[in-house]
Image (cartoon, grey):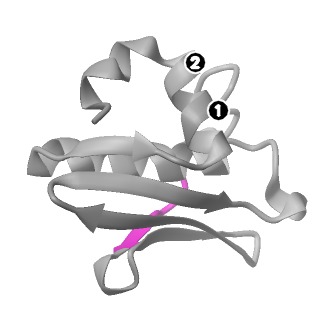
Amino acid sequence: MTQNDPLASDPDVRHEPAQGRFATTVDGHEAELLYELRDGVVRIVHTGVPQAIGGRGVAAALVRKALDFARSQGYKVRPDCAYAAQYFQRHPELGTLLG
């Protein structure tokens, strides 16, 4: 747990590749990260977290899972949604994933 990610542990994030998304349900609310995969680049296009579960690190957990997926497959990442772009700014050590 970090200051920016206040959940005691990451929620159970599912990868739904046919839908191009990572999703989780927290306290009955679904949050998602949508992506497009093309030419070895995972383009993160949207991260959506309902206000009821906002501020609890859910979006960060979704981005981490997407980055883990990209890294494990040897893909680069293009953070086209504002949250994912901010995540990369807060974590410059991940710059090698940018593509």
Per the model, the C-alpha gap separating discs 2 and 1 is 12 Å
Image-quadrant location for residue 9 = top right
Main SS of residues in magenta: loop
| Residue range highlighted in magenta | 11-15
Residue 2 location (% of width, % of height) = 61, 21
Locate residue 21 relative to residue 70 in the image: left or right.
Answer: right
Locate residue 23 relative to residue 39 in the image: left or right.
Answer: right
Q: Nearer the viewer, residue 32 or 38?
A: 38
Q: Quadrant location of the N terminus?
A: top right
Quick one: label 2 or label 1, which is nearer the N terminus? 1
Residue 10 visible in rendering: no
Image-quadrant location for residue 57 = top right
Locate residue 99 relative to residue 71 in the image: left or right.
Answer: right
Q: Residues within 10 Å of mark 2 (few under 14, many from 20)?
A: few
Q: What residue appears at the point 48 percent right and 63 percent down from the top-left corner? A: 12
Q: Which mark is residue 5?
A: 1
Q: Which mark is residue 66?
A: none
Residue where numbered disc 2 is placed: 90
Q: Residue furthest top?
A: 93
